[in-house]
Amino acid sequence: MICFEQFHHTHELFLNEECLNIYINQLKKNKMKKTIATLLISLSIFATKAQTWTLDNSHSSVNFAITHMVVSETAGNFKKFSADVTATKADFTDLKVNFTIETASVNTDNEKRDEHLRGDDFFNAPKYPAITFTSTKTVLKGNNLTLTGNLTMHGKTKAVTFTGKYNGTIKDPYGLNRAGFKLKTVLKRSDFDLTWNKTLDQGGLALGDEVTVTVNIEVTKK
């Protein structure tokens, strides 16, 4: 197709009508392509935006257990804690967690013992009011969850790995998306300079060095 016509006398070039229509249509197509591309980029950004989940404290818990007098075990929990839970994927394979526990909220159903735990021999709650955990790596295979991160307690920070289960996600009767996790780890008190102890007359120590920590997390999202 010849898109230019040359006038015999003037030797000037002019775009004929058919080619002009083709040119206009091409401009429209290019504009449409740009619009579609912009829309796809916007949708992609929206789809990958981290979704924030809200911790349901009334259905979550932070529990611990430690060997007592060699032959038994003493358990306790923390009453006050908070968490920022985010994920861009619905299956939580890129789960990120920032968890904060108030040390002064330690509870073993024995006020005298709890005061001892809040004091200098243990958590020293006035000086170290919080225990924090920030996740750095998530591995989820089926429902088996491994969450690695940095735990800070009593002025010391250590890499810690929690293992457990992702219990799934449901739509609750109130229209909220609800997900649950159960995670466990074993900490050494000595790693965090929590070394108070007493030697028993018959040998052994009043408290074990290892503490089993179990965290149940329930979160919701609209």
Image: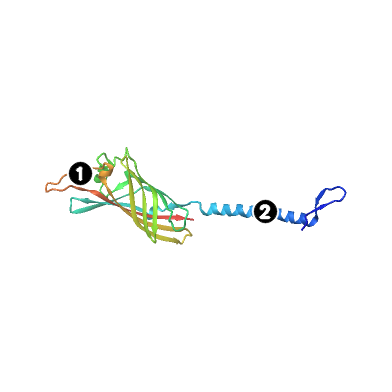
Image spot of residue 190 (x, y percent): 25, 44
Element carrying mark 2: helix
> Considering depth in this image, is 80 or 196 the residue closer to the camera?
196
Q: Which mark is residue 30?
A: 2
For disc 1, the marked residue is: 197
- Which class describes the residues within 10 Å of circle 1: few (<14), some (14-19), or many (20+)? few
* Residue 209 shown left or right of residue 182 in the figure: left
Q: What kind of residue is marked 1?
A: Asn
Dot in front, 1 or 2: 2
* Residue 5 shown left or right of residue 143 in the figure: right
> Considering depth in this image, is 158 or 72 the residue closer to the camera?
158
Question: Where the N terminus falls, by quadrant?
Answer: bottom right
> Considering depth in this image, is 127 or 203 the residue closer to the camera?
203
Q: What kind of residue is marked 2?
A: Asn
- Which class describes the residues within 10 Å of circle 2: few (<14), some (14-19), or many (20+)? few
Image spot of residue 214 (x, y percent): 31, 53
Q: Is residue 177 above or below residue 119?
A: below
Residue placed at 14% from the left, 46% from the top? Answer: 200
Please identify the residue farthest to the top as the structure is shown.
127
Image spot of residue 4 (x, y percent): 79, 53
Element carrying mark 1: loop
The residues tagged by marks 1 and 2 sit, at their Cα atoms, a distance apart of 76 Å
Residue placed at 15% from the left, 48% from the top? Answer: 204
Image spot of residue 63 (x, y percent): 31, 52
* Residue 122 shown left or right of residue 143 in the figure: left
Please identify the residue farthest to the left as the structure is shown.
202
Residue placed at 24% from the left, 45% from the top? Answer: 113
Mark 1 and mark 2 residues within 8 Å of each other at the beta carbon: no
